[in-house]
Image: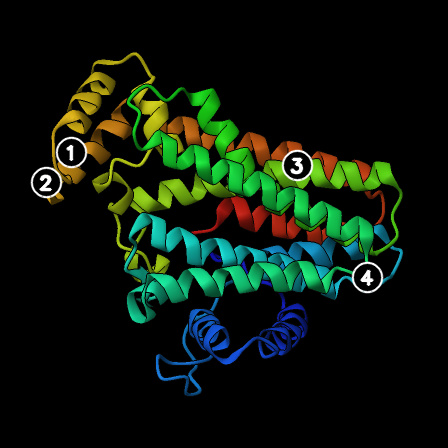
C-alpha cells in the first residue's frame, strides 16, 4: 500500500460525521469547505473530487481501539481532520500554492478572504465538537497553538539564511508533529485511557508526525506530481527551508555552500535551477540522512506504541508503517 489511507469502515464513519459537521456551517463557509474537501465544485454543486487521506482520523480511531477500552472516538477523529484542513486552507494562501489534490486550491478559486474565513470556520467547528469532552478539547487547543507557533517559525525562516537543523526540527514538531501526536492522544483520551497511556501514545504520534513531514519534504523535491497532486520542486523554487534543504545547507560540504549561493540569487528559481538545487541536496547526503531519520523515528514510535498498548496494536502499527513508507 503506497498511500496512507484509513480503512473503509474508518473512512466511511469519519466522512459521514465530517460532512454532517461541515453542513452546519453558514453557506459561504460551507461552499468553500465543501470544495476544499472535494464534495462540491466551485459553483457549490455536488462533485466527487479527490479528498484527503484521513490520516489523522485513522490514528484517532486506531489509538482508541488499541487501548481496548471502547468509548466513542469519532468526534475526536472529525475534530483533528477539521483542524488539519483549517491549516491547509491557510497554508495554501500563505505559500501561494495553486494546486492541491489535483485541482486548484480554494483560495485560487474563491479568493484569499473566503479561503481564510472558511479555515477559521473549520477551526471553530473542531473545538465546538469537543466541547463536551474537557480533556480532549484542551489537548486539541494546545496542539493548535503549537501548530500556529510552528507556522510562525516557518514563515520567519523564509526571511533567514541561517536556519539551523535543530530549530527546523523544532518548527516541524509544532507545525506538523503536534497534531499527529494529538490524534493518538485524543483516541486514548476519548477511550478513557489513563494519563500515562495517553502520554506514551502522544509521544509516539509526535515521532510519526515528524517522520511524516520529512517524507512530505522529500516528496516535495522528488515526488511524482501525478501521485502527490502538487507541483514538484515548488518548495525549492520558493527557497523553502524544508528539512532536507536545511540539512544540506548546514552539511558543511562544498555542495551545501553551492546551494546556499544558489538560494542567495535574486528572483524565483527556474526549472534548471530547481533541478540543480535538488541534485545538490542529494549530493550533500541530506536526502540519505532524511531517509535514515524516517526509519529511526518509525522504530521509536512503534516501540512506544507497543509499550503503551500491550494488546492488539496491529492497526496502529500498520498506520505507522504507511506514514513512513508513503509515496503521496
290 left or right, relative to 304:
left
Give the mark toward the camera: 3 or 4.
4
Work out whether residue 302 can be spotted.
no
| Label 3 residue SS | helix
> CA separation, marks 3 and 4?
30 Å
> CA separation, marks 2 and 3?
39 Å
Q: Earlier in the sequence, mark 3 or mark 1?
A: 1
| Label 2 residue SS | helix
Residue projecting furthest to the top:
252
Q: Earlier in the sequence, mark 4 or mark 1?
A: 4
Which numbered marker is on residue 272?
2
> CA separation, marks 4 and 1?
53 Å
Q: Where in the figure is residue 27, as x and y percent of width and height?
A: 50, 80
Q: Residues within 10 Å of mark 2 (few under 14, many from 20)?
A: few
Instruction: Name the residue located 73 percent from the left edge and 65 percent from the top edge.
Output: 74
Q: Earlier in the sequence, mark 3 or mark 4?
A: 4
Q: Quadrant of the C terminus?
A: bottom left
Q: Earlier in the sequence, mark 2 or mark 3?
A: 2
Q: Which residue is mark 4?
A: 132
> CA separation, marks 3 and 1?
35 Å
Instruction: Name the residue located 80 percent from the left edge and 42 percent from the top edge.
Output: 198
Instruction: Name the residue located 61 percent from the left edge and 36 percent from the top edge.
Output: 207
Residues at marks 2 and 4 touching, judged by CB atoms closer than 8 Å: no
Q: Which residue is mark 1?
A: 276
Q: Residues within 10 Å of mark 1 (few under 14, many from 20)?
A: some
Residues at marks 2 and 1 touching, judged by CB atoms closer than 8 Å: yes
Q: Earlier in the sequence, mark 2 or mark 4?
A: 4
Q: Which residue is mark 3?
A: 301
Amino acid at each position: 500500500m503506497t498511500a496512507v489511507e484509513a480503512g473503509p469502515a474508518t473512512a466511511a464513519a469519519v466522512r459521514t460525521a465530517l460532512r454532517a459537521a461541515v453542513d452546519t456551517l453558514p453557506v459561504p463557509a460551507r461552499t468553500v469547505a465543501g470544495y476544499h474537501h472535494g464534495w462540491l465544485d466551485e459553483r457549490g454543486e455536488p462533485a466527487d473530487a479527490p479528498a484527503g487521506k484521513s490520516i489523522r482520523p485513522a490514528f484517532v480511531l486506531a489509538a482508541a481501539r488499541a487501548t481496548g477500552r471502547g468509548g466513542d472516538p469519532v468526534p475526536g477523529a472529525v475534530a483533528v481532520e477539521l483542524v488539519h484542513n483549517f491549516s491547509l486552507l491557510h497554508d495554501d494562501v500563505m505559500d501561494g500554492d495553486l494546486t492541491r489534490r489535483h485541482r486548484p486550491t480554494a483560495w485560487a478559486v474563491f479568493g484569499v478572504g473566503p479561503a481564510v474565513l472558511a479555515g477559521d470556520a473549520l477551526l471553530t467547528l473542531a473545538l465546538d465538537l469537543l466541547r463536551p469532552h474537557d480533556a480532549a478539547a484542551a489537548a486539541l487547543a494546545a496542539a493548535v497553538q503549537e501548530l500556529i507557533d510552528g507556522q510562525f517559525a516557518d514563515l520567519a525562516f523564509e526571511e533567514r539564511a541561517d536556519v539551523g537543523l535543530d530549530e527546523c526540527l523544532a518548527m516541524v514538531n509544532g507545525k506538523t508533529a503536534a497534531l499527529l501526536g494529538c490524534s493518538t492522544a485524543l483516541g486514548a483520551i476519548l477511550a478513557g485511557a489513563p494519563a500515562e497511556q495517553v502520554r506514551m501514545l502522544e509521544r509516539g504520534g509526535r515521532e510519526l508526525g515528524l517522520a511524516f513531514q520529512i517524507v512530505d519534504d522529500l516528496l516535495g523535491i522528488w515526488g511524482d506530481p501525478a501521485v502527490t497532486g502538487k507541483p514538484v520542486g515548488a518548495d525549492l523554487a520558493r527557497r523553502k527551508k524544508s528539512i532536507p534543504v536545511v540539512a544540506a545547507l548546514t552539511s558543511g560540504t562544498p555542495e551545501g555552500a553551492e546551494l546556499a549561493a544558489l538560494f542567495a540569487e535574486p528572483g524565483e528559481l527556474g526549472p534548471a535551477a530547481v533541478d540543480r538545487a535538488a541534485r545538490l541536496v542529494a549530493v550533500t547526503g541530506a536526502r540519505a540522512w532524511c531517509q535514515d531519520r524516517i526509519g529511526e523515528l518509525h522504530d521509536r514510535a512503534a516501540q512506544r506504541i507497543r509499550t503503551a498498548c500491550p494488546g492488539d496494536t496491529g492497526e496502529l502499527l500498520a498506520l505507522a508503517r504507511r506514514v513512513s513508507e508513503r509515496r503521496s
